[in-house]
Image (spheres, rainbow, N blue to C red):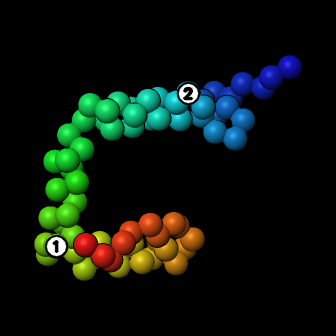
């Protein structure tokens, strides 16, 4: 017998929501304005909020997040 929760939790997480998110991400990569969004991100890093973004990146790395950024280029 499988227990069903009213809050949509399915075991360790909501697999339907995870699947929808993954599908939306894949659609964005294939069809979305990836180049435009990458340009916006670079502009934000080089702009007035760059210092705050870098602090957030470092804090995420300290907490165990993967830091895959590169300082070259």
Give how far across and how far down residue 22 sits, in percent. Answer: 47, 35
Count all numbered tags in the image, as a single digit: 2
Percent coordinates x, y for residue 28 in the rendering: 31, 35
Q: Residue furthest right?
A: 1
The answer to whether mark 2 and mark 1 are in CB contact below 8 A is: no
Q: Which mark is residue 23?
A: none
Task: Classify 10 Å Cα crowding around label 2: few (below 14), some (14-19), many (20 and above).
Answer: few
Q: Nearer the viewer, mark 2 or mark 1?
A: 1
Is 59 left or right of 27, judged from the image as shown? right
The residue lying at 32 percent from left, 33 percent from top is 30
Question: Above or below — where is 9 with respect to 68?
Answer: above
Q: Give the numbered dot on residue 46.
A: 1
The residue singled out by tag 2 in the image is 16
Q: Which picture quadrant has residue 39?
A: bottom left
What residue is shown at x 86% (from left), y 19% (from top)?
1
| Outermost top residue | 1
Q: Position of residue 25 (x, y in %)?
A: 39, 37
Q: Give the CA distance from mark 2 to mark 1.
A: 38 Å
Residue 8 picture location, percent across and down: 60, 30
Can residue 17 be seen here? no
């Amino acid at each position: 017998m499988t227990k069903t929760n009213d809050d949509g939790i399915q075991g360790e997480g909501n697999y339907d929501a995870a699947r929808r998110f993954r599908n939306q991400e894949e659609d964005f990569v294939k069809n979305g304005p990836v180049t435009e969004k990458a340009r916006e991100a670079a502009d934000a890093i080089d702009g007035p909020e760059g210092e705050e973004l870098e602090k957030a990146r470092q804090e995420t790395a300290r907490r165990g997040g993967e830091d895959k950024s590169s300082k070259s280029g």
